[in-house]
Image (cartoon, helix red, strand yellow):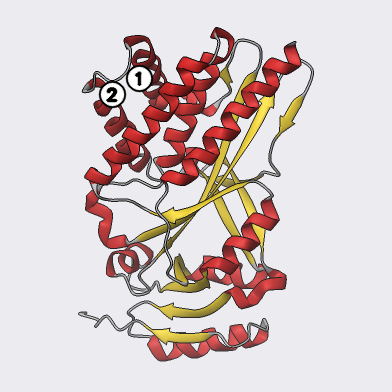
Amino acid sequence: MKFEVDKRSYEIYDDANSFARTLIKNTRQRLVYHYTSDSALKSILENSTLRLSDIKYMNDESEMKYFYDLAKKYLEGTNKFDKIFKDEIIKVIDLFDSVNRFGYSELKVCSIKSNIFVISFSLNSDCLPLWVYYTKNPNSIGYSIEFDRALITRVIEKSTKKDCFTGKVIYEESIQKKVLDKLFNYFYRLYLQEDENNKRDVIVSCEQVIKLLSLFCKSPYFKNEEEFRIVISSLTLKTKNKVIGGNNTKFRLQKGIFVPYTEINFKNKKNCIEGIKISPTQKDILAKYGLKELLEELEYLNVDVEQSKIPLRF
């Protein structure tokens, strides 16, 4: 009986992930662009790897908090659901800012933990705000790596063998509210159908999907980034006797903190890179030829190197 409860916990989460996929807005654009620093570009090319960062350690937590606050406001302003359901969801939303979001969410018989990793791209190959972010001092140069969207997505899916979510970031609040409406309607129906042992599983799964969707819904102030994301989600189900799932997680040190990430190798699919653009710089000729020599040495074939068309104003 205990195993059946554990199995149902996993099924609820798995079905919720499948439903979440229908709420994410995708794109037909063939190419996407990964903005990065000069040192990071060198590492990416030399090692043929991309890093997906654990969302709990992202530099800007406010983008996730934005959607959590929107979800809480939506629930507090509707009478569509009963008070117990709303209070339970709001309770886990309030835990977002606490240390609890880093650990296992305790269920009645087992514990469930979601690991979510993300890598960001843009649909804009020449975005001034992103250039500014990666060129914070006069001597730095930023780069935009042009990826074949479908190919790099397949590489990531095959490499991780986890749930992979891809899509455009939604900036319009009206669309975000429609997403929330569909989300809570789905989980409320599920909540009413499940027995008492599994209602908590539904609440926890709902919170995990809110967390996932928060990566695809940002404040309208960031809309000029035109962001596209690839997100990896996996479930670890921990019982008294065993652990189901888990990740091949690596760690790097950042200011004394052990930061988890997962690494994707595309050595056998170097053709997923089709071009690289250089940020606005007065060193454009040297930057271009130096990069071309590096690409040739590392056997990246048919990769176009271009200079940003944004005029330099200093």
Q: Residue at x 42, y 48 (%)?
A: 24
Q: Residue 75 carries which label?
A: 2
In the displayed orientation, state which residue is furthest to the right: 241
Relative image position of residue 179 (x, y in whole percent): 34, 40
Q: Which of 269 and 308 is in front in this view?
A: 269
Residue 311 pos. (x, y %): 24, 83
Question: Total number of numbered labels?
Answer: 2
- In the figure, 265 relative to 215: above or below? below
Locate residue 73 relative to residue 35 in the image: left or right.
Answer: left
The kind of residue tagged 2 is Leu
Check if mark 2's residue and mark 1's residue have beta carbons within 8 Å.
yes
Q: Which mark is residue 289?
A: none
Q: Mark 1 points at which residue?
A: 90
In this view, the residue in front, 67 or 135, is 67
Instruction: State the image coordinates of residue 289 (x, y, percent, origin top left).
Output: 50, 90
Q: Are there few (<14), some (14-19), or many (20+) residues within 10 Å of tag 2?
A: many
Q: What element carries label 1?
A: helix
For the residue marked with disc 1, what is the amino acid?
Ile
| Residue at the image position 34 percent from the left and 17 percent from the top | 86
**Along the horizontal axis of the image, is 242 left or right of 162?**
right
Q: Can residue 106 be seen in this view?
A: yes
Within-10-Å neighbours for mark 1: few <14, some 14–19, many 20+: many
Residue in the picture at 48% in, 86% down: 305
Q: Quadrant of residue 298?
A: bottom right
Q: Is residue 265 above or below residue 114?
A: below
Of the image marks 2 and 1, the number of the one nearer the N terminus: 2
The quarter of the image holding the C terminus is: bottom left
Measured Cα–Cα span from mark 2 to mark 1? 8 Å
Examine the rendering and report whether any part of residue 136 can be seen: no
In this rendering, the answer to whether 171 lies above or below 84 is below
